[in-house]
Image: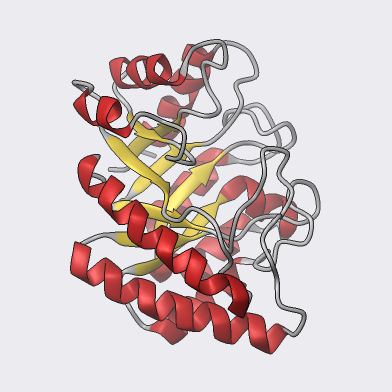
Amino acid sequence: MFRLSICAETVFGDLPFELRLKEIAAAGFLVDFWRWIGHDVERIAAEPGVQISSFTGYIAGSLVHPDGLDTFLDGVEQTLAVAAKLRCRELVLSTGEIDDQGQVVHRIAAHPATRWITAYKGLCRIAEMAEEHDVTYSLEPLNTKHDHRGYPLPHAEDAVRLIEAVGSRRIRLLLDVYHTQIEEGNVTQVIRDFGEFLGYVHVADVPGRHEPGTGEINYPHVVRALREVGYDGAVALEAYPAGNSHQAMSRFREVFSCKS
């Protein structure tokens, strides 16, 4: 059975952040969020009933440019202390900072080999830190056709080849069904090809980035594919509700709790 989580950044947009967490927890879900900078970590940690499933595992810098790697790793180390306070053992990695408009704002090395070697070195060090702190990181490909132009890991295979090279169970693949559908399509085949590397799953429908059932993605089929490859980890709704946030969460639960 999947562990179901809701991204606090995308639901209850009219409420302060802390109240969003309470609403999500009251509905029976775990909580995802993006950046911890700017939030009252102590207050979140003390909130009864709120269980953090995952959040971004770095602060700034770049995983794909040598001049930004030290800053990236420093942010990973700082974030590990926050994860411990929040009792969170699953963290998300992208290749660097993305602004509120979805623009890639971190440095990217010009040569592909430099990008790959830098990311490999960084992920090897992160794997060591993950082992020390008993956490797992999931590396996320993002689509470049609509939301994040210029992002250097647009395909699932881009991330998987790095993960294979690092060779640690502490570094996994974050499959975002929304991004995968936009960038490469054939989500089911991606799941079948790379199911053994899955560490986390994000969902939203296409177009619109709303909850499952509002667009073209056959989510019952996606659920079956995830079960076929043996995935039973966290699935997080990272979608902007088409209408009511409670209704969006209910539709999400219906799809991912279905036994078929």
Q: In percent of the image, x 70 and y 55: which residue is there?
A: 105
In the shown orientation, is residue 214 left or right of residue 32? right
Q: Considering the image in quadrants, where does the N terminus appear?
A: top left
Q: Position of residue 118 (x, y in %)?
A: 56, 82
- Horizontal and vertical percent position of residue 53: 32, 41
* Place of residue 144 in the rendered image (x, y in percent of width and height, measured from the top left): 76, 56
Quarter-of-image position of residue 154: bottom right
In this view, the residue in front, 148 or 160, is 148
Say how many tags the image has.
0
Residue 43 can be seen in this image? yes
Residue at image position (39%, 14%) is 19
Please report the residue visible at 61 percent of the width from the left and 41 percent of the height from the top. Answer: 218
**Residue 78 in the image: above or below residue 31:** below
Q: Residue at x 20, y 62 (%)?
A: 134
Along the line of sight, the residue nearer the viewer: 97 or 211: 97
Q: Is residue 185 left or right of residue 175?
A: right
